Image: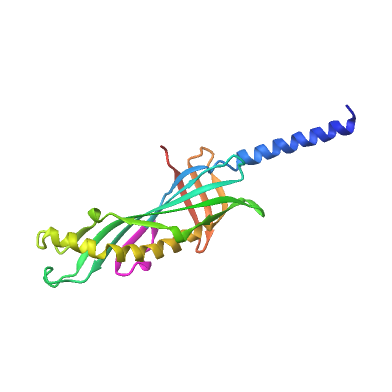
Amino acid sequence: MSKSISVLLGSLAIGVAATMTYCSNHAKFIGTWTAINPVNITAQIPGASSASSLVTIDFIDNLQKNGGAVNLQSVINVTRSIDADSLSAGQPYEVKLEAKASVDGTWHYDIDDDDDLLLALDLSKLNVDIDPGKITFTQPAATVVPQVHLDSLALKYVDTWKRDLTGVIADDLSRYTVIEDIEVSKDGDMLSFETQSPEAKLHFRRDIK
């Protein structure tokens, strides 16, 4: 074998090894991660006294190791008020509800920086679900207002609440379309990265299934 061919084969081997190392090192974020802290979205929810969104990200690999599918989910907890009616003795109702949102998309590396990811999310297909059975009324006391009336109120307002939350959560999840400086802890349990709209460093814990 000539010296030039040996050099060429050696270079190819190094290139393949480097590619394998690149894929291996940059696939550590594959898996499901839940934010350590929920995001306060109170100001974005009409009539809310408190509201938070806890995001989970599921990065899914593909065979080429350069991209794949991604799913974002959010568990939203809201406390808000609605107007008084004839059965509430003139007191507004305080309502607590939980919603779950989900959207699918794809991820791939930013060609300009291999520590950054770009996510393509179809937010027009964001699904927000509210279980009417988990809506609770804490003011006025449920013993004063018949439960059948409270159940009726829940059904009356659930579509409006879903519509309000869909816009807010779509805006919140849109910040994940560009993820910068992604890092995974040495033990593989913690994930961190930066977003720019708004600017923040976010921390996630790996979900153990």
Looking at the picture, tell me which residue is in the foreground, 132 or 191.
132
Farthest residue toward the top?
Answer: 1
Q: Quadrant of residue 17?
A: top right
Location of the C terminus (image quadrant): top left
Q: Which residue sits furthest right?
A: 2
The N terminus lies in quadrant: top right
- Residue 75 placement, left or right of 206: left
Image spot of residue 57 (x, y percent): 46, 49
Residue 185: x %, y % from top left: 52, 42
x 43%, y 41%: residue = 207
Nearer to the camera, 145 or 106: 106
| Start-end of magenta stretch | 38-52
Above or below, 103 relative to 157: above
Residue 39 lies in the magenta stretch: yes
Residue 18 in view in this figure: yes
Which residue is painted at 80% across and 33% down in the image? 10
